[in-house]
Image (tube, rainbow, N blue to C red):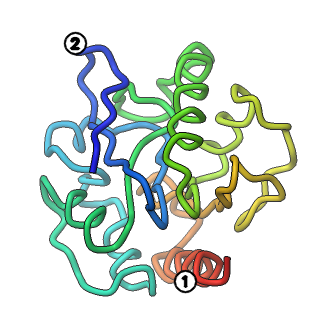
Amino acid sequence: MRHLRTSPPNLQTLPDYLGAGLRLISIGLNPSLPSVRAGFYFANPRNRFWKALHGSRLLSANYVPASGVEHELVAHEGIGFTDVVKRATRGGHELCAADYRTWAPVLEEKLRLHAPRCAWFHGKLAYRNFLRHSSLTSVPVVWGAQPVRIGTSIIFVTPNPSPANAAYSLDDLIAWYDRLAACVAAD
C-alpha cells in the first residue's frame, strides 16, 4: 500500500490509505477533528460507520476501530480511505467553496490513478460538491450507483453515517452498505 501525501505538512488531517487493486475507496466529506485526534477515520463514537460496516456484507471479518485499522482494511478487504476535502473541521458546515475547488481535482486525480472498482461517497453533499468542482459532467445525484464513472470506477453514494444525519437509521445504513456490496460484486 502506498500513502499519497497530498496535503501540506502543516495541515492536520488524516492520511490517505490508497493503493492499486482496491475494491472500494471510502470517501468522506472531510476529516472530523475527533478523527484527526484519534488517528483514524470515523472515530467519533456517535458516528455509525463502523457499526454499519460490521453489520453489512462488505467485510469478511470484524475490525477494531482504532488507529491503524485502515492498514488492515486495505490489506485484507481491499478498502481504502480518503476525503473530498482534506481540511479537518468540527463539521461540514465549516467548509467553503474554495475547499472544494482546491481538493476535488486532487481527489479526482487520486481516483483515476488508483482506479478502484468503486468510489464510495458518504452522502449526497460530498458527491455533489465533488461533481461541481471536478471534470465530470454534473448529473442529478441519487442514492446508489451513479450514471457516470471515474475512468473504470463505479461511483456509489450512500447516506452519510454522521450523527448529524439522523434521517437514516443504522438499519438503513446497513441496507445501503449491502447494496454497495452487491453492486461491487456484480461489476
Q: Residue at x 60, y 64 (%)?
A: 158
Would residue 30 be found to the left or right of residue 173 on screen? left
Q: Residue at x 51, y 62 (%)?
A: 166
Towards the viewer: 56 or 134: 134
Of mark 1 and mark 2, the one earlier in the sequence is 2
Based on the displayed image, in which of its 4 quarters is residue 168 positioned?
bottom right
* Label total for image: 2
Q: Residues within 10 Å of mark 1 (few under 14, many from 20)?
A: some
Identify the secondary structure beneath mark 1. Answer: helix
What amino acid type should be assigned to the residue bearing mark 1? Asp
Towards the viewer: 39 or 151: 151
Q: Is residue 40 above or below residue 120?
A: above
Q: Considering the image in quadrants, where does the C terminus appear?
A: bottom right
Q: Is residue 17 above or below residue 166?
A: above
Residue 138, image x and y in percent? Answer: 84, 38
Q: Which mark is residue 178?
A: 1
Would residue 21 be found to the left or right of residue 90 on screen? right
Q: Residue at x 70, y 48 (%)?
A: 151
Based on the displayed image, in which of its 4 quarters is residue 186 positioned?
bottom right
Q: CA distance from mark 1 to mark 2?
A: 38 Å
What amino acid type should be assigned to the residue bearing mark 2? Asn
Residue 18, image x and y in percent? Answer: 37, 48
Residue at which label 2 appears: 10
